[in-house]
Image: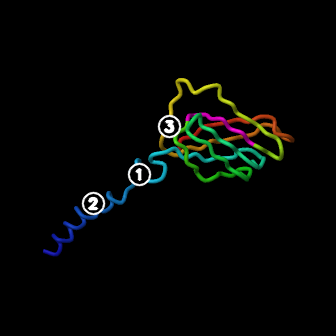
Amino acid sequence: MNKLKNSFIALFLLPGLFLSSCSKDNEGPFANEAGIRIENLSAYTFDEVLVETGGGGEQEYFGVAAGGVTEYKPFEYTYRYAFIRTVIAGDTLTLQPVDYFGEQQFASGKFTFRIDIVGETTPLYMVFEFKED
């Protein structure tokens, strides 16, 4: 009888416990808003990065080291690109979208804005990549 009882526990209760511990996509942070972080792909430290997502909010990130990644910050929504202003040792570089017409709006989830800077001795221009996390 004990073997039957142990088999019942192993077959029915343990899988139930395992499945109930799994997280769902619509739970947790950024289930109802977009979370954006900055990844610095360049050899420069970003003194300041301003991100404005076309109406979904704006956030500033400070002191993003070369090769560094920031924490996620909340936005109402984002697109695959945004207005981005980066300050590097007094030099300011800007990505300015013309519009967001026809673009998909992301209102939930985590995203990384990967930024690289072209220019070996001085920052010349910014290169941007959108990544869904």
Label 3 sits on residue: 106
Q: Nearer the viewer, residue 32 or 119?
A: 32
- Residue 57: x percent and y percent? 58, 41
For the magenta stretch, what is the residue range? 79-86
Q: Horizontal placement of 124 versus 67: left or right?
A: right
- Residue 59 sits inside the magenta stretch: no
Real-space CA distance between mark 1 and mark 2, rounded to the nearest whole angstrom: 19 Å
Q: Which of pointers 2 and 3 lies earlier in the amino acid sequence?
A: 2
Residue furthest to the bottom in view is: 2
Residue that carries the numbered disc 2 in the rendered image:
16
Label 1 crowd (10 A; few <14 / some 14-19 / many >=20): few
Residue pictured at 66% horizontal, 35% vertical: 83
Give the residue pinned by disc 1.
27
Instruction: Kindly report the distance in space between the C-alpha atoms of the residues bearing marks 1 and 3.
Output: 16 Å
Dot 2, crowdedness within 10 Å: few (<14), some or many (≥20)?
A: few
Residue occupying the point 59% across, 34% down:
54
Label 3 crowd (10 A; few <14 / some 14-19 / many >=20)? some
Q: Amino acid at mark 1?
A: Glu
Please, what secondary structure does the residue beneath circle 3 have?
A: loop
Residue, far right: 121
Q: Are marks 1 and 3 in contact (CB under 8 Å)?
A: no
Taking the image as shown, residue 2 lies to the left or right of residue 37, namely left
Q: Residue at x 79, y 45 (%)?
A: 88
Q: For the residues marked 2 and 3, what is the alpha-carbon distance in whole angstroms?
A: 33 Å
- Disc 1 element: loop
Tell me the quadrant of the picture where the N terminus can be found: bottom left
